Image (tube, rainbow, N blue to C red):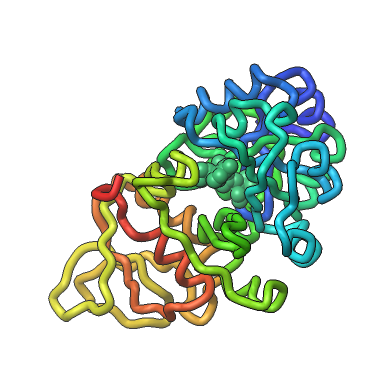
Amino acid sequence: MRISPDEAARLLANGHVVAVPTETVYGLAASLTQPKAVEAIFALKGRPANNPLIIHVASTSQLIPYVKSFPEGFERLAEAFWPGPMTIVLPVREEAVPEKVRAGLSTAAFRVPHHPLARELLQLAGPLVMPSANVSGRPSATSPEHVEGDFGIEFPVLDGGACERGLESTILIAKDGEWRVIRQGALPPEAFGEVLGYVPGVEAPNSKAPLCPGQLYRHYAPKAHLRLRDSFAEGMTGIVLGYSGRAYPPGLRVIALGTLSNAEEVAENLYRTLRLLDQEGIVEAWVDSDVPREGLWKTIIERLRDRKSVV
Ligand code: TXA
Ligand code: MG
């Protein structure tokens, strides 16, 4: 059910959950001050209680009541990338952030989104917790249709059309005086180089000492088994997620992710394509991974890597 910003604000104030567009992916929103709605988010998504939520606010100054201390470099990052597809994990005043939201940790994740509808709603009804609007383990939703596919046609959705970025926000944390990327996303690590004076390293989830247990769950996956390959020989058959303008052997059915010269376009199409595989009942597909190993491509390939065997 498509709703207006005013209806969405009213539903949120009454303890309901609604879907909201952001520039990255759709979020499933609940008011930070409505414990029942926060619980409903975990139930709706089938999300484990030890996977914390991102708190979304309308402006950086709204973080002040929640945050214990701001690490060196925070202000420069916020100034340069908010509003936008960056999430920052900060130490919090535990009494100010509901335990369920932070899954019992002494930190919480924060973001100021850029999408005009998300901003309007945050002004009316924020702060809002917003995980991606998908059932846990499914690819994130990048259109109202995806949200309705996971939660039903009656589910309240603020309609912002297709998401511009198509990949989740990049998550940063300060550790031992240095910023690290703990989830690759819509902003590649290189993007932070100029502001920080160095390119933050990417931290793979550490199964022995995860920053939060939620990091270890399998994410962003279609049902199909995806197999990455750098080359495709004559005689190969099956389905390949490839690129328009590149030639593939005639036995392969090509589903184009976009153009090789345009990583942004491929990112925007990615989850729609993965959901298409599920809709068509496709159980396995090749992925053409012969792409530049830089910038946004690293996030794209990371999302396409089949992690069934990892978690
Ligand atoms: O682009 C996005 O970030 C979207 C839109 C809706 O804003 N949201 C999103 O939320 O992707 P979600 O819940 O699907 O992913 C949030 C990630 C999870 O992997 C969670 O484990 C991590 O953030 N996270 C949340 N709080 C954390 C914390 N205190 N420390 C480390 N990781 C945290
Ligand atoms: Mg998610």
Q: Nearer the viewer, residue 91 or 5?
A: 91
Vertical side of 181 occupied by 195: above or below: below
The quarter in which the N terminus is drawn is top right
- Classify residue 216 as left or right of residue 56: left
How many tags in the picture? 0
Residue ID at (25%, 79%):
231
Instruction: Locate residue 117, reporting x and y percent.
Output: 78, 46
- Classify residue 60 as left or right of residue 105: right
Vertical side of 151 occupied by 260: above or below: below
- Classify residue 221 as left or right of residue 184: left
Name the quadrant containing residue 235. bottom left
Residue ID at (57%, 54%):
168
**Is residue 143 shown to the viewer in this render?**
no
Residue ID at (66%, 47%):
90
Residue ID at (51%, 23%):
43
Instruction: Locate residue 295, reporting x and y percent.
Output: 53, 75
Q: Residue furthest left?
A: 235
Q: Nearer the viewer, residue 295 or 210?
A: 210
The quarter in which the C terminus is drawn is top left
Name the quadrant containing residue 144. top right
Instruction: Locate residue 279, reporting x and y percent.
Output: 38, 44
Instruction: Locate residue 106, reporting x and y percent.
Output: 61, 37
**Is residue 180 shown to the viewer in this render?**
yes
Q: Nearer the viewer, residue 84 or 174?
A: 174
